[in-house]
Image: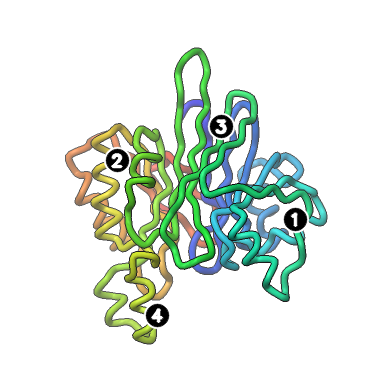
């Protein structure tokens, strides 16, 4: 990507946070680790919370909002969230009302100069859940980045929103065989496999092929389950699906260190 730089700072059930920079703005998607950890991740990519102009939340589960309260109190960064997610978060007795909170329907957009952030609904077992795209337009040309994790299955909304993206962070949560053979109780396995659960390696591979056929060049596989997946298994599943495309760059997000979207070097897990 030329005008959009993106990193997964943290990824997985222990916490999620994605950093995106354009010529107009620096923004975060989710803050599912402590405020101190978010600051460390940003420092690792030569940024800081003092540079962040907005935080966009995908949904209200703790691995996506853990650091929001402290960040909101200390830094007063505008936080954008779907109304249903915010209401569910506020009902949590351990949560307090965030400062500088902007509520939206499931489909909304926010502009920062030539940069536009757009949401799209995603199927997940939360009060509401969305993915996002970031578009930067200059001299009649548009560059696009997409983010979609915590998705039980691929919908028309997801496909139509992400198509045409130069780079995409996409969920590859579990290997189905590992999940069935693993230690999770049966009801939790069914939840993960449901249409409002998490995306498997196989379904991720099929979708990355679709996106590659429509011009996406860079992929980062995200939100891998610690118990039900391994980075090489997820990567091999997707590489097999897109093997005919010679210019694709594919990496796997790390649970605790930044991974550049567009790099073909997987992290050391």
Q: Mark 3: few, some, or many residues within 10 Å (few <14, many ≥20)?
A: some
Label 2 – label 1 distance at C-alpha: 35 Å
Q: Which mark is residue 234?
A: none
Check the image and report above or below for 269 versus 177.
Answer: above
Q: Secondary structure at mark 1?
A: helix
Q: Which residue is at a point 24% across and 74% down the rendered structure image?
A: 177
Q: Are marks 3 and 1 in contact (CB under 8 Å)?
A: no
Q: Which residue is mark 4?
A: 188
Q: Which residue is mark 3?
A: 116
Q: Which residue is at a point 24% across and 36% down the rendered structure image?
A: 213
Q: Which residue is mark 1?
A: 71
Q: Which residue is at a point 37% across and 44% down the rendered structure image?
A: 219
Instruction: Mark 1 vs mark 4: give the one in front.
Output: 4
Front residue (pair 136, 219): 136
2 or 1: tag closer to the N-terminus: 1
1 or 4: tag closer to the N-terminus: 1
Q: Which residue is mark 2?
A: 211
Label 3 – label 2 distance at C-alpha: 21 Å
């Amino acid at each position: 990507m030329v005008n959009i730089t993106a990193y997964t700072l943290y990824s997985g059930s222990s916490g999620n946070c994605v950093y995106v920079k354009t010529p107009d703005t620096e923004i975060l998607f989710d803050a599912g680790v402590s405020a101190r950890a978010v600051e460390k991740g940003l420092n690792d990519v030569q940024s800081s919370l003092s540079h962040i102009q907005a935080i966009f939340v995908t949904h209200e589960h703790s691995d996506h909002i853990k650091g929001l309260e402290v960040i909101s109190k200390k830094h007063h960064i505008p936080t954008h969230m779907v109304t249903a997610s915010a209401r569910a978060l506020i009902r949590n007795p351990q949560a307090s009302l965030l400062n500088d909170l902007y509520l939206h329907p499931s489909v909304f957009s926010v502009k920062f100069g030539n940069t536009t952030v757009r949401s799209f609904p995603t199927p997940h077992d939360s009060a509401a859940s969305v993915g996002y795209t970031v578009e930067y337009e200059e001299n009649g040309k548009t560059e696009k980045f997409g983010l979609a994790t915590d998705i039980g299955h691929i919908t028309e909304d997801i496909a139509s929103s992400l198509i045409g993206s130069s780079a995409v962070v996409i969920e590859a949560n579990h290997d189905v065989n590992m999940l069935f053979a693993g230690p999770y109780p049966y009801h939790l396995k069914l939840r993960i496999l449901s249409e409002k659960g998490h995306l498997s390696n196989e379904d991720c591979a099929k979708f990355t092929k679709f996106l590659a056929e429509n011009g996406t060049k860079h992929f980062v596989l995200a939100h891998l389950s610690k118990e039900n997946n391994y980075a090489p298994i997820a990567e091999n599943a997707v590489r097999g699906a897109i093997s005919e495309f010679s210019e694709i760059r594919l990496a796997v997000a790390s649970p605790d260190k930044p991974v550049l979207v567009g790099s073909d070097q997987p992290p050391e897990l």
